[in-house]
Amino acid sequence: MRSQEIQRNLQPSNEGKGNYFTAIPSGSRDPHHRKQSQDPGPIENPKYLGYQLQSHDRLISQLLDVKIDLIEAQWDAIYRKKIEDLMIAQNEIHALLVNKEYEGWDEERGKKAEEIIRKLENFDIQPSEYEEDPKVKNTRASVKTSEESLKNCRINHGVERTIRKYKESTR
């Protein structure tokens, strides 16, 4: 029944004009005659752009917080290593000079103890002293992940374009 109705509508009218009942308006048939929108898009709202940029700033803040955590983890590792070195040195000095009962006096024992202290006074920090610490490794991985996330956000959200639009809309 429905197909018969469609067929009937496609037949020329009895008036002989050649028009079809299901005719498509001429403006929509030809893509060259379509009206182009003069409005390129809605006017960018400075408040909305500002909100987008604040959201991006929060991501930057999170990244910087993780970097601070990394620095803290590195210093904690250095501190633990230096305290461990101090304890070992103290035990060595006591073993050399205090805890031994020996006959006479040995000049070499005092020199060895002073050499231990000189090594401790040299506070040259090598990255190998803290990079192997598990907390430092985990935090460094978090920094890398956060940096990648921020990079992807900049690419996906067009932050530079948003900044430019925000500046243009607030002039």
Image (cartoon, grey):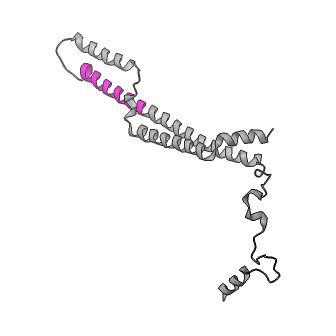
Q: Is residue 93 magenta?
A: yes
Residue pictured at 31% horizontal, 14% vertical: 114
Residue 9 appears left or right of 118: right
Query: Chief secondary structure of the magenta span?
Result: helix
Residue pictured at 39% horizontal, 25% vertical: 126
Percent position (x, y) of residue 37? 78, 54
Percent position (x, y) of residue 82? 38, 27
| Residue at the left extreme, as displayed | 103
Residue 37 appears left or right of 118: right
Q: Is residue 140 magenta?
A: no
Q: Is residue 102 positioned above or below 12 on the image?
A: above
Task: State which quadrant residue 153 falls in.
Answer: top right
Task: State which quadrant residue 100 falls in.
Answer: top left
Using the image as rendered, state which of residue 89 and residue 2 is in the foreground.
Answer: 2
**Span shown in magenta:** 77-98
User: Quick one: quadrant of the C terminus?
Assistant: top right
Q: Is residue 93 positioned above or below 7 on the image?
A: above
Residue pictured at 31% horizontal, 15% vertical: 115
Percent position (x, y) of residue 7? 68, 83
Using the image as rendered, state which of residue 41 and residue 115 is in the foreground.
Answer: 41
Residue 55 appears left or right of 144: right
Residue 149 appears left or right of 117: right
Q: Is residue 118 positioned above or below 49 on the image?
A: above
Q: Is residue 113 positioned above or below 19 on the image?
A: above
